[in-house]
Amino acid sequence: MNTENLFSYGTLQNKNVQIKNYGRTLEGKLDKLTGYALSMIEITDAAVVALSGATHHPMVKHTGIVTDAVDGMVFEISAAELKQTDEYEVDDYKRVEVTLESGKKAWVYINA
């Protein structure tokens, strides 16, 4: 099975969200995304709010400042699960490939 690395700094680390989204819990490793800063956005999609239990979700934005860093988890997921993640994330986010502090390449959702 081809796997994709997904870096999560927010609700996808929540076991309930993982079970509802993927039908399983994900095993992850701690990592860091450098050159990005964290903020919060309001989520207006009722289905996403119901799934996460939160009206505000974290979002990262590229700053390019090397001292800016966001802690999170890297999960290995299937290509099909990556598509499910695209459906879970609202239009305020876009998926980009980044290189994490560990040197791993991973997908992450940032401000659109």
Image (cartoon, helix red, strand yellow):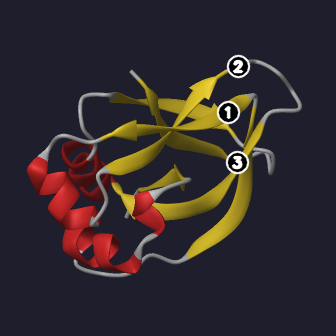
Give residue 98's quadrant in the image: top right
Please report contact status of discs 3 and 1: CB closer than 8 Å, yes or no. no
- Residue at image mark 1: 37
Q: Position of residue 26 (x, y in %)?
A: 44, 76
Give residue 39's quadrant in the image: top right
Q: Nearer the viewer, residue 91 or 26?
A: 91
The CA distance from mark 2 to mark 3 is 20 Å
Task: Name the residue at 80% across, 51% down.
Answer: 102
Q: Position of residue 38 (x, y in %)?
A: 61, 38
- Residue at image mark 3: 104
Q: Earlier in the sequence, mark 2 or mark 3?
A: 2
Q: Quadrant of the C terminus?
A: top left
Task: Name the residue at 40% across, 57% down.
Answer: 2
Kindly state the secondary structure of the residue where label 2 is placed. Answer: loop
Instruction: Judge whether 1 appears above or below 37 on screen.
Output: below
Q: Is residue 62 left or right of residue 34?
A: left
The CA distance from mark 1 to mark 2 is 7 Å
Q: Position of residue 70 (x, y in %)?
A: 70, 45
Q: Earlier in the sequence, mark 3 or mark 1?
A: 1
Kindly state the secondary structure of the residue where label 3 is placed. Answer: loop
Instruction: Judge whether 11 appears above or below 66 on screen.
Output: below
| Amino acid identity at mark 1 | Ala
Please report contact status of discs 1 and 2: CB closer than 8 Å, yes or no. yes
Q: Is residue 37 left or right of residue 6?
A: right
- Residue 106's label in the rendered image is none
- Residue at image mark 2: 63
Instruction: Judge whether 51 appears above or below 111 on screen.
Output: below
